[in-house]
Image (tube, grey):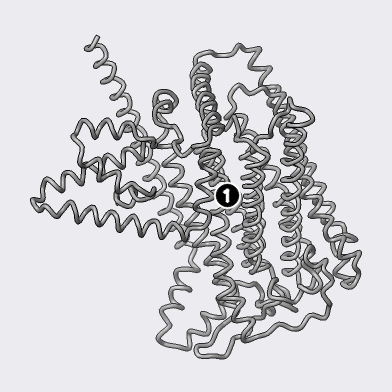
Amino acid sequence: ELTKDILVIPGKSELVSDLVNLSAGARFQAIRSLPMSFNERKTVRLTSFIIIHLCNISDNDTFYLNLNLYLSQQEQSELSRQHLIIWQDTLKEIGGRFGTSVLSYFLFLKWLLQFNLFSFIINFCFITIPQIVHAPNISSTTGFRGLELLTGVGYFNQTVLFYGGYNGEVIVSKPAYNMQLAYFFTIAAYLKDLVFFLLLLSMSRSFQKNFVLETGPVSGGAWRLLCSWDFSVVNEKAIQYNKNNLAIQLKESLSERLQEKNKMSLSDRIKHLSLHLLAWLLSLGLAIGSGAGIYFLGTDPELAFSFSHNPNNLRAEASTLLLPVVVSLINLIVPLLYSLISKIESYSNPRAKIYISIIRNVILKMSILGILCFYWLNFVPNSISCWESFVGQSVYRLLIIDFIFCLLGIFFGEFLRNVIGTMCIQSLGVPEFDIARNVLDLIYAQTLAWIGIYFSPLLPVMQVLKLFIIFYLKKISLSLNCQPPKHIGRAAQIQTVFIAILFFPSFVGVLSMVAYTVWSLEPSNQCGPFQGLKTPFHTIFNWTASIQNFPESNWVWWIFENILRSELFYYLISLIVLVITYFLWQITQGRKQLIKTLREQIVNVSAEIIRTTL
């Protein structure tokens, strides 16, 4: 495992070979002087120690040569593998010029792109290809007019892009292919299994790395000063930004300790509490007002369903873009108002200000999505014949308009802001790259993509193209128009918060909506794979009833009837999960206490050595 860690950066095997030939003292000094992070130096030191130990055990003179050859071969294979990784060199360039805080945004974007790419491959292989090959779509009765690229209706209405383009027939082949089961299990397996466990794994790893291992009595002082420098940065401006950021983080740590000691007076507490209460009332009022406006706009019958009754009316088709434009305007303007509101609160800790801003923006975006989901699941099924396709088209429009506003934000919010700050009003300066706002925009768009995956199985391919274009446009804009943020707090911990937000409320909310749709809502009778069923979940009942005719499959029916449909089974599963969570939490607390004790021991030993030396 250590050799794999060594080979992440080219040339490490040669470095270890040179270190092995040095004496113990020279090797110690050489490792200390390496321009690497603390963890990388630790890996190099352990690897060289293991190689020396193995060489001392083995009396064979060719052992070292064989080991060196093995390391070289592994390095070449690692280099070949890295060439296949998307954006490897580009990400290194971004990290070298702007640091790991800005790099975390692009890594998050790449991570989401891989999610959507895998989702598209699964849906295309198991749902779309069988539908196209064995049950071709009905030819569209509407000609292509161009506006469909923005609205998703008209020509695209009966295509495999949306739910209505699929049917629930059993494809007669060897073996037979049930489209109902394929549609149900493909969507369920992706959301319930793949996304759930990957998000949970990513969140737990990030939490362990950035909260458990990086907290303690010295994490804000000597540890941060000596071990937190980003050695991947090579650009002079970025180095200066990193210096300033390190100074800010040290000031934050000292400020937090001073705040714990210096307690405010009662009058100051009342004043601060009143300001915070006023700010929260204004923020919640804006979120509630935005949600109410979207609700009344969405339920307006003249705007909501005018195109459904007039499919050939170009004006009615264009009116379907009104709601997505209003939603995007709210997502653009209200966060700016939140920034103005936060100025009256006068937070002394920049990190607290960032967290409060994130919470308010999450409440706004999730409120908007919650109102839209409530409208789609309660009003649309009773008004539209093929309501699933209508919901898929609505999500399609939201994603398209959000992408257009993202492009406009890059041009007007970053390019023109840079021109104004450098040529017209120089006191404004170069705009900072707002990591929190950009990541929250990615989370919002990804939530939309997850919502629409049941109603539009090919929606992930749109998200892939969107993220691919945004990556390069953001990179160009970052290089030409922006500077790294000066106040980022603890970027790694904020990144953990973003993953947690993506899991809850984003993914959990999407999973709840799709589960409600599958278990409770009656599907359309005129389109889709589940037409004629009481609920989409009844396709599982039909399947289990059919396999009862085959004696060799009775065990599947027994498991479904006696285990999967039993409330006791889910109660026991929930109890087991809670018990495991409790034990893991206890282990985490024990490790944190152990780390704290060891760090205190290091401080005490160091103080004792200093006293004896003096």
The answer to whether one can see residue 572 in this image is no
Picture quarter containing residue 395? bottom right
Picture quarter containing residue 179? bottom right
Which percent across, then down, holds residue 316?
89, 65
Under mark 1, the amino acid is: Leu
Which percent across, then down, holds residue 389?
73, 69
Q: Label 1: state its secondary structure.
A: helix
The residue depicted at 77 percent of the width and 50 percent of the height is: 327
Which percent across, then down, holds residue 115?
55, 59
Does 599 appear above or below 78? above
* Residue 59 falls left or right of residue 390: left
How many tags in the picture?
1
The answer to whether one can see residue 568 in this image is yes
Nearest the viewer among 349 and 41 is: 41
* Residue 522 falls left or right of residue 570: right
Does 505 appear above or below 357? below
Badge 1 local density, few (<14 within 10 Å), some, or many (20+)? many
Picture quarter containing residue 401? bottom right
Q: Residue furthest top?
A: 614
Which percent across, then down, holds residue 529?
65, 78
The residue depicted at 38 percent of the width and 45 percent of the height is: 584
* Residue 321 falls left or right of residue 194: right
The residue depicted at 62 percent of the width and 12 percent of the height is: 266
The residue depicted at 79 percent of the width and 30 percent of the height is: 424
Does 454 appear above or below 590? below
Nearest the viewer among 37 and 169 is: 37
The residue under label 1 is: 502
Looking at the rendering, in which quadrant would you find the C terminus? top left
Nearest the viewer among 114 and 370 is: 114
